[in-house]
Amino acid sequence: MALPKKGLRKITVNNVRYAWSTTGNDGYIGLIVISLDKEGQLLSTGFDYNTGVTGGYYSFAEQTPDRQPFIITPGIVRQVIEYALLKGWKPLVKGPHFYLADKGPLILRLPK
């Protein structure tokens, strides 16, 4: 599946090139990742716009004024890719979309 060219970013993880894009819709930030080396499974997941969980857990928690804005950075994308690979994502094999949100909580290493 092709991603829209506008806003497309690139990252290399374990010598595999990926393209990623974010969207803001429906009350969350969507993240889509696909391999640039070979057309395979598309990875998609989502994040709450705000996170207040110490340690940076993946969260759909209710928003409150004291929460900090969550920004998808290349470091976050790298962690999502590594986690998805551990959970069975096959970026180099054609198959159905891989929805990471269905695979359990994601613990992110966020800068303090």
Image: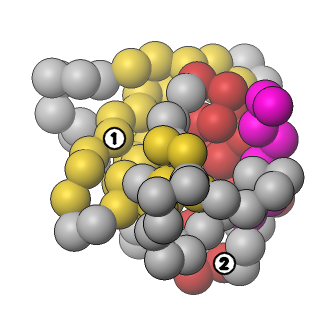
Nearer the observer, 73 or 78: 73
Question: For this view, does 92 lie left or right of residue 33?
Answer: right
**Residue 92 horizontal side relative to residue 54, left or right:** left
**Mark 1: which amino acid?**
Thr
Q: Position of residue 93 (x, y in %)?
A: 54, 53
Q: Residue at x 48, y 77 (%)?
A: 62
Callout 2 secondary element: helix
Tell me if residue 38 can be seen: no
In the picture, the quarter occupied by the C terminus is top right
Q: CA distance from mark 2 to mark 1?
A: 20 Å
The residue tagged 1 is 22
Residue in view at x 60 percent, y 68 percent: 59
In terms of image quadrants, where is residue 94? Answer: bottom left
Image x and y of residue 55, in percent: 84, 52
From the viewer's perspective, is residue 108 above or below residue 34?
A: below
Residue holding disc 2 = 103
| Span colored in magenta | 106-112
Q: Hey, which residue is sitting farthest front in the picture?
A: 65
> Crowding at label 1, few (<14), some or many (≥20) Cα neighbours within 10 Å?
some
